Image: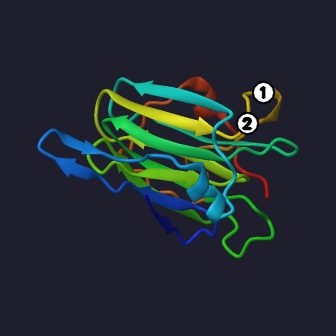
Amino acid sequence: MIFTETRLKGAFVIDIEPRVDERGFFARSYCQREFDLRGLVQTTAQCNIAHNIQAGTLRGMHWRSIPSPEAKLVRVVRGAILDVIIDLRPDSATYLQHVAIELSENNHRALYVPEKFAHGFQTLVDDTQLFYQMSEFYDPKYDCAARWNDPAFGIEWPIRNPILNDRDRSYPDFLA
C-alpha cells in the first residue's frame, strides 16, 4: 500500500499495489501494521456501505464530537465520487481547510479521514457504492454536521444542484 499524506496533516490517500497476472490482480486494501507504522487510528470497529442511486447525490458534511471522535477509511467499490474532508482541529495550521479527492472503482484509492475531520461526498456517476471502515461504533448522540455549501468551507462541488435529503439540506452553518 502506498500512503500519500494530503496537505491536511494526518489525512492520507491510500493506493493499492496490485499484483497482476492473467486473471486480474490481487492487492491489500488494509493492513493494521501499515496503519500502526504511521500512528493512524485503527478503523475496524464497524464497517458500513453507502449505496447511491443517482449521480449528483451529496451526503455531508458529517463528523463525530468529543468524547467519541471517529476516524474513517473510505473506498468506492462501484462508481465514482468526489470525496471531501475538512480539518476541524482548532489548533491545526489547516483549520477549516478542505481537500477533495476523486475515489472510484477504477483508481482503487481509499481516503483515510482522521478524527476531528468533517466528511462528505458527491457521486459523479449513477449506481455508486462506498465501503467505510469506522474506528467507533455508531451512536447518534455524537453526530455533528454542517451545511454542505457553507461559505466558511468554500467547497466547489462538481454537480451544481445536488440530490440531498432533508436532513443534509437543513444543517446550519459551521460555528467555529
Dot 2 falls on a residue whose secondary structure is loop
Q: Residue at (39%, 51%) from the top-left corner?
A: 109
Q: Residue at (38%, 48%) from the top-left corner?
A: 103
Left or right: 13 with respect to 134? left
Q: Is residue 136 visible?
A: yes
Quarter the N terminus occupies? bottom left
**Depth check: 165 or 38 in front?**
38
Its colouring scheme is rainbow
Residue position marked by numbered label 2 in the rendering:
136
For disc 1, the neighbor class at 10 Å (few under 14, some 14 to 19, many from 20) is: few
Tell me residue 65's x, y (percent): 81, 43
Left or right: 57 with respect to 127? right
Looking at the image, which residue sits at the far left? 22
Check contact, mark 2 vs mark 1: CB within 8 A.
Answer: yes
Whether 19 is drawn above or below 39: the answer is above
For disc 2, the neighbor class at 10 Å (few under 14, some 14 to 19, many from 20) is: some
Q: Amino acid at mark 1?
A: Asp
Q: Amino acid at mark 2?
A: Glu
Whether 126 is drawn above or below 70: the answer is above
Tell me residue 171's x, y (percent): 67, 37
Whether 147 is drawn above or below 41: the answer is above
The image quadrant that residue 73 belongs to is top right
Residue position marked by numbered label 1 in the rendering:
139
Q: Is residue 151 visible?
A: no
**Depth check: 111 or 151 in front?**
111
Tell me residue 90's x, y (percent): 79, 65
Q: Which mark is residue 169?
A: none
Quarter the C terminus occupies? bottom right
**Marks 2 and 1, how far apart in space?**
9 Å
Left or right: 154 with respect to 29? right
Q: Residue at (27%, 52%) from the top-left corner?
A: 19
The image quadrant that residue 136 belongs to is top right
